[in-house]
Image (cartoon, rainbow, N blue to C red):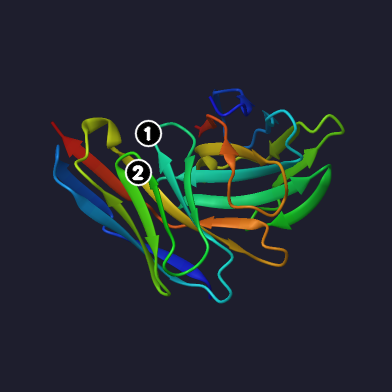
Amino acid sequence: DSGVTQTPKHLITATGQRVTLRCSPRSGDLSVYWYQQSLDQGLQFLIQYYNGEERAKGNILERFSAQQFPDLHSELNLSSLELGDSALYFCASSTSGVTGELFFGEGSRLTVL
Amino acid sequence: EDQVTQSPEALRLQEGESSSLNCSYTVSGLRGLFWYRQDPGKGPEFLFTLYSAGEEKEKERLKATLTKKESFLHITAPKPEDSATYLCAHLEGEGAQKLVFGQGTRLTINP
């Protein structure tokens, strides 16, 4: 158990819909990362927050947005969903924002029908 | 463009058959080379960090090494529970805040 909690574990929705994925980092960790993993793309970095502020951005679509709240939990919002958005979405956390030693959650599996 | 490339994509071994996984990198100003293990449907689990050529790290049946161009993950006398996808990664971007992963090597150990 990494100590990172993600909800929901599974989500099935339709094209055009909007979903919110939630992540609680390990106790004491200030930095939260979001990754997308699909079969053909591997593990893709989306965005990183440190203590509520956005610190780094990957190839995150404009339809996707994220935020980190004062209690350090984070949410990833996916809107106008397309079939290609079906993937595993992972949240990770770390103590600092400059490290390669991340602790990953179990992921949220999104299926768009 | 900075990148890491892993080979082979997949590897099947018999229990006890030692081998190595490769991660070659073209990264200017390497700020660490990281190895992770990922079980199917689970999040990656951190294994090792290597910072400089010649460095080695060990954990049970795994040993990671680093040269100026590549890293190897050596697995000695593997067991079926070592079956997983092994990922290498490097830090990228201003402030080294983006951890970028390779495509991984899917390792299967047959009993």
Q: Position of residue A39 (x, y in %)?
A: 40, 46
The residue drawn where x is 58% and y is 47% is A101
Q: Where is residue A106 in the image (x, y as percent from the top left)?
A: 52, 29
Chain at tag 1 = B
Q: Where is residue A2 in the image (x, y as percent from the top left)?
A: 56, 29
* Left or right of B1, for residue A63: right
- Going by the numbered disc 1, the residue's amino acid type is Pro
Chain at tag 2 = B
Label 2 packing within 10 angstroms: few (<14), some (14-19), many (20+):
many
* Left or right of A43, for residue A50: right
* Left or right of A65, for residue B27: left
- Tell which residue pokes out farthest to the right in this image: A70
Labels 1 and 2 touching (C-beta < 8 A)? yes
The numbered mark, 1 or 2, whose residue comes first in the sequence reads 1
> What residue is shown with label 1?
B40
Residue B107 visible in this rendered orientation of the protein: yes
| Residue closest to the eye, A10 or A105 | A105
> What residue is shown with label 2?
B85
Where is B42 relative to B94, above or below? Answer: above
Where on the picture, by quarter, is residue A20? top right
- Going by the numbered disc 2, the residue's amino acid type is Thr
| Residue closest to the eye, B87 or A76 | B87
Q: Position of residue B13 (x, y in %)?
A: 15, 44
Label 1 packing within 10 angstroms: few (<14), some (14-19), many (20+):
few
